[in-house]
Amino acid sequence: MLFQNQLMLYISKNSISVHKILIGKNPTSTLVTEFSWTPELLPGIINTIRRKVGSKTRIVLSEDLAYVASFSLPASTPNLVEAIKEKAQEQIPDSLDETIWDYKIGSSASKTSQTIPVQVAALTQAFYTSFSPAFIKAKLAIEVMEPISLALARLTAAEPNLHIIAYGSTDSLLMATQHEYVFVTQRVSQITKESLLRFIEIMKTQYAITPLKIIASGIVKSGSELHIEQVPLENKLLNPLIGLAFRKDTNTKETNVLNLAIAKGTHVKTQSEPGNTISENTQSVNTVPPEVNQSSHRRTILVMVLCLALLGIIGAGVFSYLMGPKEKTPVQPTATPPLYTPSPIPKTASPTLPPLSKFSVVVLNGSTREGVASKLAALLTENGYQVIQTDNADTSDYQSTEIHVKDNVPESVKIALDKLVKTSYASSIYGPVVNQKPDIIIIIGQK
């Protein structure tokens, strides 16, 4: 089914953006909000996003957060999944046993074909380790997740011949594709005629394929500057989020479907949160042999019996002592020990706060209570902060209070601010929202 009139995510190496997708005669994608993220800030950011997007979403990943591998296997290959994994591991530097991966069989595969075209995608291990626990903890379900190259290839699937997509953005991308199958991708700093010529040379020498067309989209040079002899050029507006929204096939059990959200490939437990996996279809494996478990159980029972016996002997001795005859002994006077005078404890100097009026503060009411933004603004002003605005937040269902601070705010100010806000609300410090203008934004929640 089409993912229409819903909120979707685009995740790159440094930011997460939320987009409103409208599917119709002229599909549109509108930016709702954007966050800078680090592994430490990710759990709080995903919680905030969960309140905006609801219980499920779709995700497009920038090419530096995922690997895409393409190859062919003989049609008669036995143990196909293991063969795909082994071949993909030759092209993917991270261990597939330590991340999540999936594959699909290319549409050109037929019963009479001697080879099977295979497409594999995998999350980078570094991203998977940060990403998995945060989404599980927030209980945000992922319906579909795929790299940007696969989403773009869907938008040009009607092209009959092999072609290049030159997609210009913050992280520009060159890719060779046909019928939604991505042969090769290359990230470049800028799309120019020279970068296109180098990419075409790679296609010819390393993959023995030649493009018959170039489709340019996004922030690229004008058509005349990118023109390459005997290769037609077409300018076309391509949006990978809309490409993913058009995706109907989400059933990962089919071999012609690739979906990193619930993969046919390997799932692993993260080291940071044992027992958690991205997919609820994942099965955890007990690697302890049954005989070891039984032996351990017998040892536990034996230790418990010995402890009970020891406690019984000690109890009997205590009872005998208390009930037996007692011999009175004269009490000898003891000298009063001299009083101990403790040495004075040196006081640690408190961190010096810079003038708080240097930092601009915006207070937003993200709760259903009225007037709380004005009250907190008055408290901040009394304590020296420069409150420049109070307003309502984008939604009124924030559960806890969020404090978003820029990097220029010293740690001593963050601590003092958090301590002050905590006198009234359960607050947490977060990194800045992308394009955040004030030094500090406080969003008041229900707590």
Image (tube, rainbow, N blue to C red):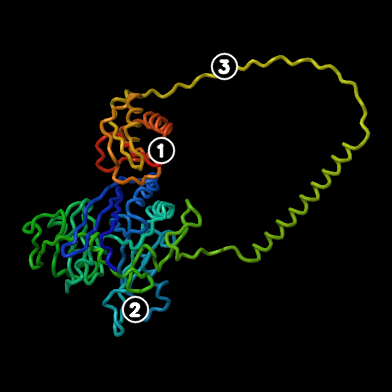
Contact between labelled residues 2 and 1, with CB atoms less than 8 Å apart = no
Which quadrant would residue 73 be assigned to in this image?
bottom left
Q: Read off the residue under disc 2.
A: 74
Location of residue 164 in the rendering, given as x and y in whole percent from the top left corner: 18, 65
* Residue farthest along the bottom direction in this orientation: 112
Contact between labelled residues 3 and 2, with CB atoms less than 8 Å apart = no
Q: CA distance from mark 1 to mark 3?
A: 36 Å
* Residue 141, above or below 433: below
Q: Is residue 221 left or right of residue 21?
A: left
SS of the residue under disc 2:
strand
Q: Read off the residue under disc 3.
A: 344
**Mark before the other along the chain sequence, 2 or 3:** 2
Name the front one of labels 1 and 2. Answer: 1
Q: Nearer the viewer, residue 94 or 127?
A: 127
Location of residue 193 in the rendering, given as x and y in whole percent from the top left corner: 12, 57
Amino acid on which the number 3 mark rests in the picture:
Pro
Q: Read off the residue under disc 1.
A: 427
